[in-house]
Image (cartoon, coloured by chain):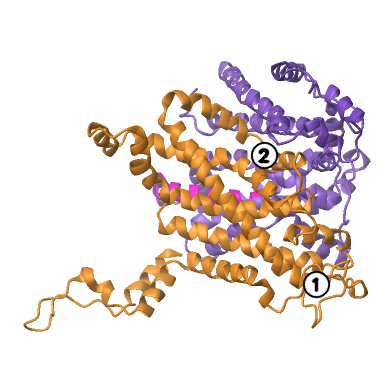
Chain colours: A purple, B orange
């Protein structure tokens, strides 16, 4: 097992290398001089020259690639043009809200979607099944930020049950922290929930036709026991896979959700950076987020072994 | 869903004539021709019953598309006309969806907003499909390219699509054309994946072997043997790309990095309404409803096509 983890970790290096080069190339594939664009409409030629030197754009292209990769390997994500602070520091400051939001949304999604999917598959063709499928397809079509505003309007503006916006760090008390996160997390979880419910249903349908399920029922085991211990466990590989792949959706949704609920997370950092054309920050966030995504999918790959003992690496 | 539909089908369409009792002296009707005897109406009803998702999706989408295409006809005004006196009016007879903070009619703007969304959705899916298919065919067919290119694709797909699109928009001027470019680029690796997977399995197919034996060259094989087999999965894929492109255009515009503010698009209207959630919720409510309905319709078309074309 351990050498396998090591081998897998090494295998993510080329993927991350591609990400790093792609993020670097972003500046160069778009039309126009990046220094001019970053400097903005009212910049003097000195400003532009300063930015060009700061980003190393005055160096030969291959030197730039080398410098960029070398910095990343050392964990240096550069400095923000706008605030002058290291990008890594900025990301560190904003990480708490985003991690809390995505984790909370993930917990909500999985704990609602998996039972729904199991139920739908078990009662295939019934009203419950149809309701779950309708929920899944409409959840997948819902614009995240719009849903956020609708929830704010209902639960915060009309009923005053929950705060409209904002974030309360966890060290200022768990209850305020949770209250501020409920609406954003529910908003964010819907798309992910729809995706997982659909996959759970499809995967369960495949397993429920197996002989050992009929045997389990014939033995007189309680349906709940059969569904969870016999069916769900064997249907879990595609579900876990989609949870990993769908994490990209969660990140994308977080950018928009944070903007609706004024959460000081990585999404807001990105959006602010885009308005200010603070390119090092944009590059840093993309790099870190993609790295997390790759790592999560690595964990998913390794989970296969736990879930299905037949798989040996 | 499907089981009940099949039961209904047998009772439809003129009934099944038992072959045991043909009229004397006349050859028994061939059952294969049975469908030909149905009236056009009955055939349409049968299709609707078999494919409810597809039909509902197509009908809703057609209504929305007609709405956008003939926007001036549907009792709309000028989407850019400002009437400061009537600003933030709640929905009334003259302003069905109310007005925004400049006194512009939200109904008019929402109907006009359909255009941007549908144009972006259609263009992104067509471009993504064309570029992705071309690259996917080439990559899938040349083994040496394959290993390297798939690592590159894995890397590109590790970047969340919305972040990549945002980063691209940060370096370009806001315009509909640039939004389309920013949304196509993240989709291309995903199309390549689908195409490549099919090419890999088709490449070993007997028909390809046969074509090679007859002297067909690679471009011919790709065009006439591989591509037709890819049509069904790609059409389904295109609908999903279209749906997500429409959502992403709204996200980008909402975040201020999409369609330029002077063009009414659903994302722009909602972006302007976000400061007025408590005062004038209608500015966000109605464009969002249209957006959700459009994306839902396209997803239904995709699900329906997947079932009709039998794509896994």
Please tell me whether mark 2 or mark 1 is closer to you in this view.
1
The residue depicted at 59 percent of the width and 20 percent of the height is A5
Q: Of the numbered discs in the image, which one, if any, rests on residue A155?
A: none
Nearest to N terminus: mark 2 or mark 1: 1
The front one of B97 and A101 is B97
- Magenta segment, which residues? A192-212
Q: Is residue B4 magenta?
A: no
Give the percent coordinates (x, y) of residue B56.
52, 69
The residue depicted at 40 percent of the width and 54 percent of the height is B310
The front one of A258 and B133 is B133
Residue A233 visible from this viewpoint: no
Q: Of the numbered discs in the image, which one, if any, rests on residue B105?
A: 1
Residue A52, image quadrant: top right
- Label 1 crowd (10 A; few <14 / some 14-19 / many >=20): many
Name the residue beneath numbered marker 2: B160
Chain bearing mark 1: B
- Height in image: B138 above or below A228? above
Q: Is residue A208 magenta?
A: yes
Q: How many marks?
A: 2
The front one of A99 and B275 is B275
């Amino acid at each position: 097992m351990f050498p396998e983890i090591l081998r897998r970790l090494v295998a993510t290096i080329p993927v991350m290398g591609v990400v790093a080069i792609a993020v670097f190339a972003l500046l160069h594939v778009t039309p126009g001089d990046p220094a001019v664009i970053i400097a903005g409409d009212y910049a003097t030629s000195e400003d532009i020259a300063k930015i060009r030197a700061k980003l190393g754009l005055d160096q030969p292209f291959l030197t730039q690639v080398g410098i960029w990769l070398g910095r990343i390997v050392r964990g240096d994500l550069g400095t923000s043009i706008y605030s002058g602070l290291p990008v890594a520091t900025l990301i560190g400051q904003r990480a708490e809200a985003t991690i809390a939001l995505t984790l909370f949304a993930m917990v909500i999604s999985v704990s609602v979607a998996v039972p729904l999917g199991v139920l739908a598959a078990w009662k295939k063709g019934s009203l419950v099944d149809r309701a779950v499928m309708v929920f899944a397809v409409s959840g997948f079509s819902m614009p995240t930020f719009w849903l956020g505003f609708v929830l704010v309007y209902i639960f915060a503006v009309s009923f005053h049950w929950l705060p409209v916006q904002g974030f309360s760090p966890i060290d200022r008390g768990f209850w305020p922290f949770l209250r501020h996160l409920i609406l954003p997390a529910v908003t964010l979880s819907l798309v992910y929930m729809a995706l997982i419910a659909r996959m759970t249903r499809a995967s369960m349908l495949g397993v429920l036709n197996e002989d050992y399920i009929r045997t389990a029922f014939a033995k007189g085991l309680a349906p709940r026991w059969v569904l969870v211990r016999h069916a769900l466990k064997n249907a879990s590989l595609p579900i876990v896979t989609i949870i990993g792949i769908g994490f990209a959706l969660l990140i994308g949704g977080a950018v928009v959700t944070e903007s609706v609920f004024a959460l000081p997370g990585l999404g807001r950092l990105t959006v602010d950076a885009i308005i200010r054309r603070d390119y090092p920050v944009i590059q840093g966030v993309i790099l870190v987020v993609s790295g997390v995504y790759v790592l999560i999918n690595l964990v998913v790959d390794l989970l296969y072994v736990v879930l299905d003992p037949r798989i040996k690496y | 869903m499907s089981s009940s539909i099949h039961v209904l089908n047998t009772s439809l369409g003129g009934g099944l004539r038992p072959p045991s009792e043909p009229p004397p002296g006349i050859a028994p009707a061939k059952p294969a021709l049975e469908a030909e005897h149905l009236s056009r109406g009955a055939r349409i009803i049968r299709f609707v019953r078999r494919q409810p998702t597809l039909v509902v999706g197509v009908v809703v989408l057609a209504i929305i598309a007609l709405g956008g295409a003939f926007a001036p006809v549907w009792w709309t005004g000028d989407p850019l006309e400002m009437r400061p006196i009537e600003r933030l009016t709640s929905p009334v007879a003259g302003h069905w969806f109310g007005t925004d903070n400049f006194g512009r009619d939200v109904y008019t703007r929402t109907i006009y907003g359909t255009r941007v969304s549908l144009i972006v959705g259609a263009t992104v899916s067509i471009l993504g499909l064309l570029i992705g298919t071309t690259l996917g065919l080439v990559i899938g067919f040349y083994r040496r390219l394959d290993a390297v290119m798939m690592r590159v694709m894995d890397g590109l797909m590790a970047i969340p699509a919305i972040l990549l699109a945002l980063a691209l928009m940060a370096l370009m001027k806001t315009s509909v054309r640039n939004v389309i470019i920013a949304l196509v680029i993240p989709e291309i690796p995903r199309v390549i994946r689908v195409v490549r997977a099919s090419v890999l399995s088709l490449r070993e197919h007997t028909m390809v072997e046969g074509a090679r034996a007859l002297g067909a060259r690679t471009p011919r094989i790709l065009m006439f043997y591989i591509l037709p087999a890819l049509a069904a999965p790609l059409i389904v894929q295109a609908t999903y790309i279209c749906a997500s492109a429409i959502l992403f255009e709204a996200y980008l515009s909402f975040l201020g990095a999409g369609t330029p503010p002077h063009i009414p698009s659903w994302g722009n209207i909602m972006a302007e309404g976000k400061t007025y959630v408590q005062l004038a919720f209608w500015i966000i409510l109605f464009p969002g409803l249209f957006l959700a309905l459009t994306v839902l319709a396209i997803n239904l078309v995709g699900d329906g096509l997947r079932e009709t074309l039998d794509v896994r």
